[in-house]
Image (spheres, rainbow, N blue to C red):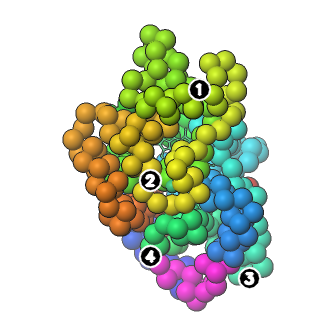
């Protein structure tokens, strides 16, 4: 049965069973899988362009905690402490209704076949493409976890005020390098962030009641009007104000101009690491280069510790274990 990769993963030889994933995984068991995913995405993103950003982020927050196993989608229940309650996720991650709709359509077309973890990977790619970004060949065959890790979500997702060395460490822990860090940060070419995630930069970046000196002055004044010193924590600002719904390379151009929204964005340029500086500069100058590396790094991120073979399960409902 080609829809089930017996013999590929689960031998514990190669770390995490990387060789368990392959692009043709659903070729005979659910050939329409990508069409169904994209049709739901088209509707959702037409209704709200930001949804593309939210879905891209969901795959990232899944993969950095226990690997790409849809742990992020589990609700609280007996024995499950939902990752949705973690500091990086609460009042923040979204898109669950769209994932539910995709899952429901897939259960109709190909019952009990497509995992929620693969849906997240497909939704991230589809969202990128529909926003004008690159396409890539996507290895599939991830299975879904029977557990979640609230502490993992608190400890493994990098906070927005991270220093550059800290960001590098968070990514290294997942087997990702500086090139992946810079390229994947380019995901911030779409979507928004809440005032609470960048407030410190505006009012007290170094404990001296001063703004982050790397902020462009005009940009800084604009941000202060959205994000007052006190209150307004849930006010939102685009991560790439020049083209918040378009997947392009303006995110990197803005960073060169001191107009990156989060500390974690700006430090890629100001963090005194010649490698990340050079990468920011090259992606700002060459969108094609950024697209190519983003695609490669997304595949790499999507390969973080997947469950394959007999491990895990294919959930019937992405919000709970079977
Ligand atoms: C490098 C470390 C990263 C940090 C510190 C970081 C941090 C954040 C923060 C704080 C927000 C705003 C959350 C909120 O206000 O509720 C955000 C949004 C976002 N992040 Fe990241 N992120 C990082 C990497 C990534 C990666 C690797 C991706 C995907 C490839 C990504 C994609 C997104 C997207 C698309 C949004 C907007 C979501 C929306 O509008 O709903 N981020 N990120
Ligand atoms: Ca996970
Ligand atoms: Ca953009």
Return the residue at label 4.
137
* Of the image marks 3 and 2, the number of the one nearer the N terminus: 3
Circle 3 sits in a helix, a strand or a loop, which is it?
helix
Q: Nearer the viewer, residue 296 or 21?
A: 296
Residue 115 in magenta? no
Quarter of image, res 121: bottom right
Question: How far apart are labels 1 and 4 at the CA level?
Answer: 42 Å
- Residue 178: x, y in percent? 30, 47
Q: Is residue 128 visible?
A: yes
* Of the image marks 2 and 4, the number of the one nearer the N terminus: 4
- Residue 199: x, y in percent? 56, 26
Give the number of the mark in front: 4 or 3.
Answer: 4
Question: How far apart are labels 3 and 2 at the CA level?
Answer: 39 Å
* Number of numbered discs overlaid on the protein picture: 4
Provide the residue span drawn in magenta: 22-36
Question: How far apart are labels 2 and 1 at the CA level?
Answer: 22 Å
What residue do we see at 66% from left, 18% from top? 230
Q: Residues within 10 Å of mark 3 (few under 14, many from 20)?
A: some
């Amino acid at each position: 049965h080609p829809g089930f990769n017996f013999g590929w993963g689960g031998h514990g030889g190669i770390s995490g069973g990387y060789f368990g994933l392959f692009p043709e995984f659903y070729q005979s068991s659910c050939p329409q899988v990508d069409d169904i995913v994209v049709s739901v995405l088209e509707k959702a993103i037409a209704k709200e362009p930001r949804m593309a950003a939210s879905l891209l982020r969901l795959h990232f927050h899944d993969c950095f905690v226990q690997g790409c196993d849809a742990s992020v989608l589990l609700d609280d229940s007996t024995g499950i402490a939902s990752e949705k309650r973690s500091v990086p996720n609460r009042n923040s991650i979204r898109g669950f209704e769209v994932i539910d709709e995709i899952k429901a359509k897939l259960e109709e077309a190909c019952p009990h076949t497509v995992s929620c973890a693969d849906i997240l990977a497909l939704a991230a790619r589809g969202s990128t493409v529909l926003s004008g970004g690159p396409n890539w060949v996507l290895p599939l065959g991830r299975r879904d976890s029977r557990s979640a890790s609230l502490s993992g979500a608190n400890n493994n997702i990098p906070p927005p005020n991270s220093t550059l060395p800290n960001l590098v460490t968070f990514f290294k822990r997942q087997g990702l390098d500086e090139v992946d860090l810079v390229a994947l940060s380019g995901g911030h070419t779409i979507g928004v962030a809440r005032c609470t995630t960048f407030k410190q930069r505006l009012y007290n970046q170094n404990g001296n009641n001063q703004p982050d000196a790397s902020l462009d002055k005009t940009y800084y004044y604009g941000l202060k009007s959205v994000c007052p010193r006190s209150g307004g924590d849930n006010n939102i600002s685009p991560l790439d104000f020049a083209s918040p719904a378009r997947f392009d390379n303006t995110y990197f151009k803005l960073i060169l101009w001191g107009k990156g929204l989060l500390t974690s964005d700006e430090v890629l340029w100001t963090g005194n690491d010649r490698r990340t500086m050079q990468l920011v500069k090259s992606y700002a100058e060459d969108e094609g280069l950024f697209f190519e590396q983003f695609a490669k790094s997304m595949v790499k991120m999507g390969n973080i510790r997947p469950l394959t073979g007999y491990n895990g399960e294919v959930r019937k409902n992405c919000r709970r274990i079977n």
